[in-house]
Amino acid sequence: MQLPTLPPSLLPALKHVMRPLVRLMLKKGVTYSSFADLLKEVFVDVAEREFRLDDKPPTDSRISLLTGVHRKDVRRLRAMAAGRAAVLPEDISFGAHLVSVWLNNSPFCAEPGRPLPLARLASVGGECSFDGLVAQVSKDIRARVVLDEWLRLGIVRTDDQDQIHLETMAFIPQRGFDEKAAYFRHNLHDHACAAVHNLTEDGTPFFERSVHYDSLSAAAVDQLREAVKVDGMQVLIGFNQLAAELEERDIPPPDARQRITIGLYFYTESNPPEVPDDSTTASSS
């Protein structure tokens, strides 16, 4: 088996991409040795699942050749491997669905994208209540349990009339590391999948574009940050509304369902003068 030629630009690119991940690990106490063990497991798992010949599971020897992981480690890791689906935890998925219903469905919004404050109890607000909202999505979960958790995460607030106000236009917890980590896992994974596909596969690329400037003032950055917060959120709300409509109108059979992720992000940091600027100050990629 002939191994692919390593492009000279790939390792420097991977090193750069890993820097924020290593920063996260160091801040949260993940050491090199523990991450190296985890990375070894990922190498073996990806090789086993995605690098098959004629749809047959690869041998330990082939995985060892592909990954550089010792054959004894390959055997050990394959024996202990358990399927871990790359999906959002059930409580996160339920929360995202609930917010989408509140944003888009009558009687919980004045119009799509304009959620109404809801009476907490069905005995007060009837169907147009937080009780009614939760009941529309699931009959098995008590609304009080959801409300307490959402208050903890900063997703909703209550007023002095016992009404519940949605504090976010998407299910993005303001507090709660586990919930944020679930979105970190989901969003970064899917963005990386799109980028890797565009680097390695033929055919139509996934849409992946960005705008970057390197000579802006702090005031200009603040103005752009606010524009992305307002206008970018409106774009995502529009995609969310379209996806909700399509999900209701165009229901596929269970074995033909596909999932999507659409993202938009903003990032800024200081750009010291000594950093070389090789070409233009603005571009998209």
Image (spheres, rainbow, N blue to C red):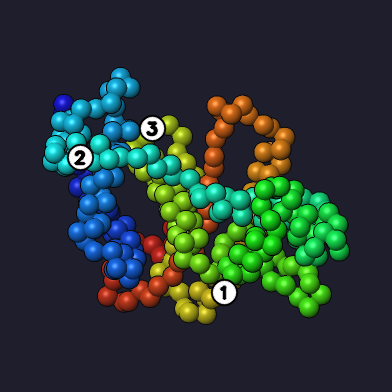
Identify the residue under disc 1: 223
Mark 3 residue crowding within 10 angstroms, few (<14) / some (14–19) / many (20+): few
Mark 2 residue crowding within 10 angstroms, few (<14) / some (14–19) / many (20+): few
Residue drawn at (69%, 62%) of the image: 144
In-front residue for pair 245/223: 245
Mark 1 residue crowding within 10 angstroms, few (<14) / some (14–19) / many (20+): few
Q: Position of residue 214 (x, y in %)?
A: 40, 69
Residue type, mark 1 in image: Gln
Precedes in sequence: disc 2 or disc 1:
2
In-front residue for pair 120/209: 120
Identify the residue under disc 2: 76
Marks 3 and 1, how far apart in space?
38 Å
Tell how many labels.
3
- Secondary element under disc 1, as helix, strand or loop, is helix
Q: Is residue 229 above or below residue 235?
A: below
Would residue 3 be seen by someone viewing this image from the given angle? no
Q: Position of residue 103 (x, y in %)?
A: 72, 56
Identify the residue under disc 3: 202
Precedes in sequence: disc 2 or disc 3:
2
